[in-house]
Amino acid sequence: MSKELIAYLARELRGLHGLYERVMTGLDEAQVNHVPEGGNQNIAFCLWHYVRTEDNIVQFVIQRKPTVWIEDGWDAKFGLDSKAQGTGFSDDDARNFRIRGLDDFLQYMRDVFRRTEDYVAALDEGEAERRITVKPVGEMSIQQCISGMCLTHGYRHLGEIEFAKGLTGTRGSSTGY
């Protein structure tokens, strides 16, 4: 992997993180926890699931460090499971998920994003090619993991959040339109 590709991943992650910040602007807890009709997920689940996934992938799977979630005691603060991140939740479990303490959750999100950005900024070419196993997906390089499990996955859930935000009657997408 080239230094240019690592720089690209770092830029794209910063951009994605900025879009998450922007899309959450102006939302309150009731809007975040609102479950849209028609079997769609609420913002709370999509946001929690993505941020927890990025935390698990970058901190634990890649670096073998404790997640921000566990290290900073966010699981206890929110009264949520220390290991769950929503993968494997039934549709009903996901629709019933709620965030209590939105401002605190947004701080957790910022902490995760900062640590991810710090890790990727320090990534070298050899480390980027190191192979890891992501359960249940399989073996891949760290570069592939960041690209797929963070960027692609993150943009997918960002789109769900924008859709759910529109269903709350709230204006403002991640891009500002």
Image: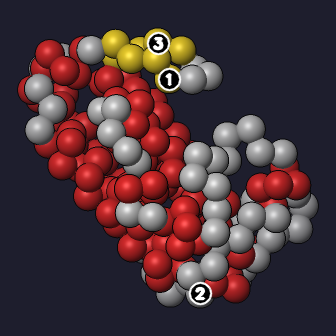
Which colour scheme appears in the figure?
secondary structure
Give the x, y percent position of residue 112.
36, 56
From the top left corner, tell me how far across and down residue 37 is, in percent.
88, 68
Tell me: 111 left or right of 163: left
Q: Quadrant of residue 29?
A: bottom right
Please give the residue where the numbered disc 1 appears in the rendered image. Answer: 134
State yes or no: discs 1 and 3 in contact (Cβ < 8 Å). yes
The reply to whether residue 90 is in sight is yes
The residue that label 2 is drawn on is 28
Closer to viewer: mark 3 or mark 2: 3
- The residue under the point 53% across, 73% down is 77
Mark 2 residue element: loop
Q: Secondary structure at mark 1?
A: strand
Q: Residue at x 24, y 15 (%)?
A: 129
Q: Residues within 10 Å of mark 2 (few under 14, many from 20)?
A: few
**Amino acid type shown at disc 2:** Asp
In front here: 101 or 161?
101
What is the quadrant of residue 109 in the picture?
Answer: bottom left
Q: Nearer the viewer, residue 133 or 169?
A: 133
Q: Upstream in the sequence, badge 1 or badge 3?
A: 1
Earlier sequence position, callout 3 versus callout 2: 2
